[in-house]
Amino acid sequence: MIGLVLAAGAGRRLRPYTDTLPKALVPVDGDTTIMDISLRNLAAAGLTDVTIVVGYRAEAVEKRQAGFEEKYGVRISLVHNDKAEEWNNAYSLWLARDHFAQGALMVNGDTVHPVSVEQTLLAGRGPSILLAIDNLKKLADEEMKTVFNADGQLTKITKLMEPADAFGEYIGANIIEASAAADLADALKTTWERDPNLYYEDGFQEYANRGGEVRAATIGQVDWVEVDNHDDLAKARDIACRY
């Protein structure tokens, strides 16, 4: 199993930081970036082969690759998304299909969370796809909301849902087992071919609709944040120093 980080997005709502950097390289604790936290967590969880999908300002990640490898004791492979500024991340995850074919613990490159999330996912291994879910947070319109049936199988994952109908928020971390990789890759391809603006979570929905197993691992009371804007960045800087 490898670690996988999606870090191709431009993060326009974080300008001016992202005028010259991808969102994943925005500092959140001194010189520590979101990418540092992702790599530190994956390494602490025992995943030392890491694939990073890059796109916008990919050269900034390339310049730091050797330093990241030395600092965290990981081996990094880069996958380049040449459509990162045009298309959404269903395509980004599909581009990494040859890498997650060996199984992957995947994290979004804009999420700040403690290593307990990775540990929870690894402890819950078994389902073909396992999603880290915060079922304690009060939800609003922007969150990636989820519903699971009585058997624990995913039935819906979307932002377009009444918060009161959701079980919890998918926080941008998951495990893709090797046994699910080929079918997920096909579901992702169907998804971005249908509409390149769709999310990889729409690919998970397609996979589940076809009968693929997608289940939840609840993360408990954890401070975390998806960094989309300057308010999120302030929260990230408040919590990152505690990890």
Image (cartoon, rainbow, N blue to C red):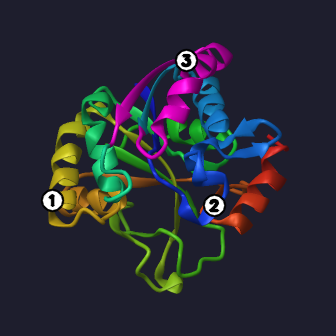
Residue receiving disc 2: 15
Tag 3 near tag 2, CB within 8 Å: no
* In this rendering, the label closer to the viewer, 3 or 2: 2
Q: Nearer the viewer, residue 155 or 232?
A: 232
Residue at x 23% of width, y 46% of height: 184
Determine if residue 214 is in view. yes
Q: Which image quarter: residue 37? A: top right
Residue at x 49% of width, y 54% of height: 10
Quadrant of the frame with the C terminus = top right
Q: Earlier in the sequence, mark 3 or mark 1?
A: 3
Residue receiving disc 3: 74
Q: Secondary structure at mark 2?
A: loop
Determine if residue 219 is in view. no
Q: Identify the disc placed on residue 57.
A: none
Q: Which residues are magenta?
A: 54-81
Q: Amino acid at mark 1?
A: Glu
Residue at x 50% of width, y 27% of height: 62
Q: Amino acid at mark 2?
A: Arg
Task: Say whether residue 170 is left or right of residue 177.
Answer: right
In percent of width and height, residue 210 lies at 16, 59
Task: Say whether residue 238 is left or right of residue 172.
Answer: right
Q: Secondary structure at mark 1?
A: helix
Quadrant of the frame with the N terminus = top left
Q: Secondary structure at mark 3?
A: loop
Residue receiving disc 1: 193
Q: Is residue 39 above or below residue 57?
A: above
Q: Amino acid at mark 3?
A: Val
Q: Nearer the viewer, residue 133 or 96?
A: 96
* In this rendering, the label closer to the viewer, 2 or 1: 2
Counting labels gives 3
How far apart in space, not on screen, are marks 3 and 1 (Cα)? Answer: 33 Å
How far apart in space, not on screen, are marks 3 and 2 (Cα)? Answer: 30 Å
